[in-house]
Amino acid sequence: MDHTKARERESQCIQEQPPACMSACPVHVDARAMIDYIRKGDFSAGFAVFNRTISFPGIIGRICDHPCQPVCKRIEAGSAIRINALERACVEYGRGTQEKRLYITKKDKKVAIVGAGLSGLTAAFDLVSKGYGVEIFEAGHLLGGRIREFDVQQLPQLIIDGDLAALEEREVVIHRSVSVTNCGGGGASFDEIVAGFDAVYVGPGPHAVDHLDLNLALTPSGRIKIEPITYGTSNPKVFAGGGHRYHPGDYSPITSLLDGRLSAVSIDRFLQGASLTAQREQEGPFVTTLYTNTRGIELLQDVPMSIKAQGYSREEAMNEAVRCLHCQCLECVKVCEYLAHYGSYPKRYVREIYNNDSIIMGAHLANRMVNSCSLCGLCKEVCPVNLNMADVCLDARQSMVKKGKMPPSTHDFALHDMQFSLSDAFYLARHEPGFSASSALFYPGCQLSGSSPHHVASIYAYLRRIIKGGVGLILGCCGAPAAWAGQEELFHRAIQTTAEDWQRMDNPRIITACSSCYRIFKDNLPDLPVESLWTVLDKAELPRLQAVMKPQTMAIHDPCTTRHDEDIQQSIRRIVAKLGVPLNELDHHSDLTTCCGYGGLMSFANPEVADKVVNRRIRESEADYLAYCAMCRDNFAARGKRVLHVLDLLFGAGSEDPAGQKGPGYSRRHENRAKLKADLLRELWGEKTVQGGLGMKLIISSEVSELLERRMILEEDLQKVVSHAEMTGEKIKDPTTGHFIARHRPVSVTYWVEYSCGASGFIIHNAYSHRMEVVGDGP
Amino acid sequence: MSEEKNSPPEQALICTKCNVQMKQGKAKASYLGSEFPIELLKCPVCGIVYVPESLATGKMLQVEQALEDK
C-alpha cells in the first residue's frame, strides 16, 4: 500500500469528522464532549470544554443563537438537545471561582479595538491572551454593544460584568465614551489610532459608517469593505467585522464572536508576517460528513425546565444530556466482530496497517489484525462512503508476502490443504465417460467434495441427466485460499490449472457448486463462462418435487461470496420454495449477509475472532439455518447450530438428523476428497486407483481427534511420525505410561506423537507440533 | 528461552534406540534465521532431544510468533 493510497483511504473514513452540532457552531464548541461530562454529572469538566472555545461563557451560555440545535441528530428521534441550556448549566454548576490562567509572554506589539461589541471584545480577549498589548475604544460608557439590549432576566448585568472582568484582569486598557472618527470633535482620531498601533480591529456595529470618514474603502451602502476570509480592509493594518457585516435584524451573538476570533487570527498572522489566507478552510460553520444512524433509536423529547428563568437544574441538565446520541458513525464496526475486536475504527486501522507495512525494524504489531479480516466486504456495504477494509487488508497481505514478511504459520495449513486439492490425490479433469467433448463442466469445488462427497456424486449424475452433449468434471481448487492469503503467485498457478484444463476441453461453460469458486472465476477469468449450480437448478427440473425431509421454517444464510450475486440468491429462494420449505430471512441477508468465519482464512489467522463472527451469526435466529455453501454449513454445525445444506433437501443427507450433524474434520476432508476421486474413477470411468497413504491403522479417540483438529494436525502427519519412528527406531519411551514419544519433521513443522501399540493398530494418545527446528548439538 | 529449564515429567525418559536414560543437555533451537541455545532432555549416546508439550505449545510458540512478526 503506498502512502498516497493509505492517506486516501484513511481520509475516506468519516468517524473522526465532527458531529453536526460542532460543525454548525461558528466557533466549533465541542458540545458532544461537553454533554458527555454533564451526563456523568461532571459540570466543571463540561464547563472547561465550553470555556475552551468560548471566552465569555456566562454571556454566550445565556444568549447564544445556537445554530447547533437545528442540526442536532436527536431531531430524528424526538427533539434537538437543548445545547445552549446545557451550556448555561455548565456555567451555573461548573464554573470554578478560580479559572485557570495561563502565563502569557508579553509581546511588544499593540492592537487597538474600536467598538466594544461582542466581536471587538472577543478580538481583544484573544489578542491579549496571545500576549499583545490591547486597548479598547468604546463610544458608549458600557462595554458589550448589543448584548446590553437583551432582557435583563435572560442576561443580567452581573453576568456581563463578571465575564468582562476577565479583560481588565488581563490588563486590557479600556477607553469608555470615546468616539473614534476622523471628523474631529470630542473623540479620538481614527487615523492617529491607526498610526499609533501596530494593528486595529474595527467593530462598528450594524450601521453605515460613511459619516465617520475613516479613510477605508466602503461599500455602496456606506459600510466598510471587508474581505471574506481575512476580515481585512483597504488598509492592511485595519481589520473589521462583527454585526457590521450583517443586516441589523440578523444579529447573531455567536457569529459576532466568530468574527472577533477570526479577525484576531488575522491580526496575529499579520503581526507575525505570516500568510493571512493559508489553511483557513476549517474556520466557521460547515456541514459535517459524519454519518449518524438514528434508526431504531427510542424517541425522546427534551427535558422540560421546572423554573424557566433559572434554566436547567443539575438533575434536569443531566437527564437532558442522557438524550444526546454522542454522534458517531461506526456503521461498519457495529456489524463486524472483526472490526469491533480491535477496539477502534477503519481510519485508525488503515493507519496502523500502513505503518505495519512500512516499518523496517521492529515488530509488525498489526500482522494478526491484517490477517484476521474475512475479506467479506460487509463494511463497504454499510459504509456511507464505501470504504472497504477487505481491500486494505488484502493489499497489505499481498505486500507482506512480496516482502517475505508474512508469518509462515498463518496460512501454511490452508495452503497445504489447497495444494492437496490440486495434487494427484484429488485433482481430476475429464470429459464425461463415453464423450470426447463436453458441453458443460461440473466444478464442485474442494470444500463440498471434502464435506459431503456423496452430494458431488449425486449432482454430477443429475447434471449428466439434464444436460446433453456430455458434462465433464474438474475436481480441484479454484485457488481462493491463496488469493485470500495474499499469495498472488500461488493463486495465479492454481487458477491457471483450471483455465488450462478448461481450454483443453474446448471452453465449455463451467457449473460450480461453490460460491467462492464462482466469484474467483468471475473476477479472475473473465473469458470463462461460469454459472452457479443454483441458477442452473432454478431453470431446470429439480431432482425431486419435494424436499427429502420436511423441515420447519428455516432461516436462509447467504454465503458472503454471493454478496453481489443477487441472481444466485434469488435462485436459491425459488428452489427452496418449490421444495415446499418455508424460509425466514435473517437480519443480515443478501447484499448485507455476513461471513461464516471461514472467509479470508480468518479462522486460521485468528480463531478467537472467527468464533465471535460465527457465534454472532448463529444467534441471529432460533430457527434451523439453511446454507448453500459447505463451509458455512460446517462452521455453523461445528458450534452446535442446527443447519442443513440445500443439497440435503435436494439429494438427501444420508443420516438421520442431518441438521444436527457436525461436518468432517480436516483429516476426513482430505480422505473424502481422495475417496471421491477414486470412487468416481472406478464407478464412472472403470479405472482402478491405488489408494495412497501408508496403510497404517491409527486408533484415535474423539477427544484426541478434537485436539488434533484444534492443533491442525492431520492423521497423515501422525502416520508419517509413527512410521518414521517404527522404521528408524528413533523414539523415546516414557516408563510411567509405557507410551512411545516420537517426532518427525517432514518439511517445516516438527510433529510429536505419543502413542502405544494396540492389537489392531497404533493408539494415539497425544500430538503436538512446533515450527522451531531443535537439534541436539551432538550427544 | 535460553534460561528455560525443561525438567522431565516426573521420571526420566528412555531413548529406545540406545536404551539409555535421557539427561538434561545442550540443544539449539532455530527459526527464521534466529538461533537460541536451550537445555533439553537428550540422549547422551545418540543425541536425540525431547521437546515436551508444555514447551512446544507455550514458550516456544510465543517465540515463534514473535519471530514471525519481526
Image (spheres, coloured by chain):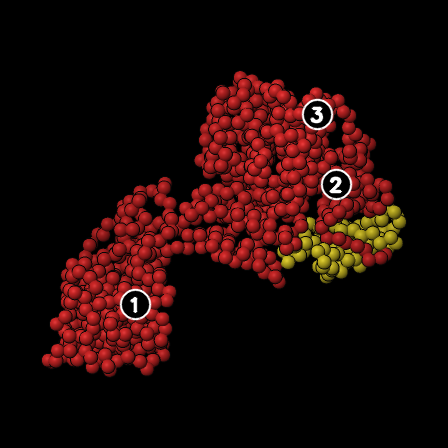
Chain colours: A red, B yellow
Disc 1 or 2, which lies upstream in sequence?
1
Tell me where residue A643 sits by quadrant: top right
Q: Residue at x 33, y 53 (%)?
A: A287
Q: Are marks 3 and 1 in contact (CB under 8 Å)?
A: no
Question: Can marks 3 and 1 be said to lie on one chain?
Answer: yes
Tell me where residue A173 sits by quadrant: bottom left
Kind of residue at badge 2: Asp
Q: Are marks 1 and 2 in contact (CB under 8 Å)?
A: no
Residue at numbered disc 3? A680
**Disc 1 on helix, strand or loop?**
loop
Q: Residues within 10 Å of mark 3 (few under 14, many from 20)?
A: some
Residue A666: x and y, percent?
Answer: 67, 37
Quick one: A641 or A508, which is closer to the camera? A508
**Disc 3 on helix, strand or loop?**
helix
Residue at numbered disc 2? A717
Q: Residue furthest top?
A: A545
**Disc 2 on helix, strand or loop?**
helix
Residue at numbered disc 1? A230
In the figure, is residue A412 to the left or right of A88?
right
Quick one: A173 or A196, which is closer to the camera? A196
Disc 2 or 3, which lies upstream in sequence?
3
Q: Residue at x 59, y 38 (%)?
A: A525
The answer for which chain carries disc 3 is A
Mark pair 1, 2: CA separation? 75 Å
Quick one: A271 or B38, which is closer to the camera? A271
